[in-house]
Image (spheres, rainbow, N blue to C red):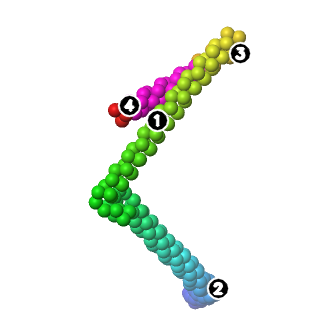
Amino acid sequence: MKNSIKTIFTIALIFSFVVVGFAQKPEHAGKKDKTEKKIKKKKKKVQEKTEEEIEETKQKKQKAEKKLKKVKEEKLEEFEEKGNSYGKDKYGLEGKAYGQERARQAKLKKEEKEKELEDTVVRGESKASKARERVKEVKASLKGKKKAGEITEEEYKEKMEKLEAIEKEADNLEEKVKKGKKLRKAKGD
């Protein structure tokens, strides 16, 4: 009798485990499939978006390349149109008359350059002299303020350094003016 109770009890126990296992399975069945489907849909959406973005960037790149190509062609055309193409348009002149016209144009161009040089030399001289005068005035003013005690020694040194830098720039400008005068004299000879 003990054996039969044990066997019945084990069979009942096994049966209850099987029933409980089957009872729980339908509740969770399909959740894994649903989550996998959601993940696949999200992957597809992300993949489609990235493909669309890649396509858009390719189109933008192609448009930019076309614009760049147009700009290059325009610049090339401008470059080809400019320049000293003296032989192309002869103003209806030929031979000696054309040569004389070109010589006249060259002389006018030379005179214009000389006038520009003269103007820059004059402007440079006046600028340098004004700078020197202004520096002298400011130096005198600084010395007076220092003696009166209106500014400290550090402020005085700092401002004097700035004035010295301005004087150096004026010196550089005067050197350039001297070179311009030499060029002017050389061209005048």
| Residue 27: image tag | 2
Could one spot residue 2 in this view of the protein?
no
- Identified at 51% across, 26% down, the residue is 170
Residue in the image at 59% along x and 83% along y? 34
Q: Quadrant of the C terminus?
A: top left
Q: Which residues are magenta?
A: 159-185
**Residue 27, picture quadrant:** bottom right
Of circles 4 and 3, the one toward us is 4
Rendered-image quadrant of the N terminus: bottom right
Upstream in sequence: badge 2 or badge 1: 2
Identified by mark 2, the residue type is Glu
- Is residue 117 in view from this perspective? yes
Label 2 to label 1, Cα distance in Å?
100 Å
Relative to residue 128, is residue 102 depicted above or below?
Answer: below
Residue at 28%, 60% (x, y): give it: 95
Q: Is 10 placed above or below 113 here?
A: below
Residue 96, above or below 108: below
Q: State the mark number for residue 118.
A: 1
Decide which of 54, 104 is in the foreground and name it. Answer: 104
Q: Secondary structure at mark 1?
A: helix
Looking at the image, is mark 4 or mark 1 earlier in the sequence? Answer: 1
The residue under the point 49% across, 36% down is 119
Q: Nearer the viewer, mark 3 or mark 1?
A: 1
Q: Is residue 125 left or right of residue 31?
A: left
Residue tagged 3: 150
Which amino acid, by three-letter code, is at mark 4?
Lys
Q: In the orientation shown, which residue stands out farthest toward the top?
A: 147
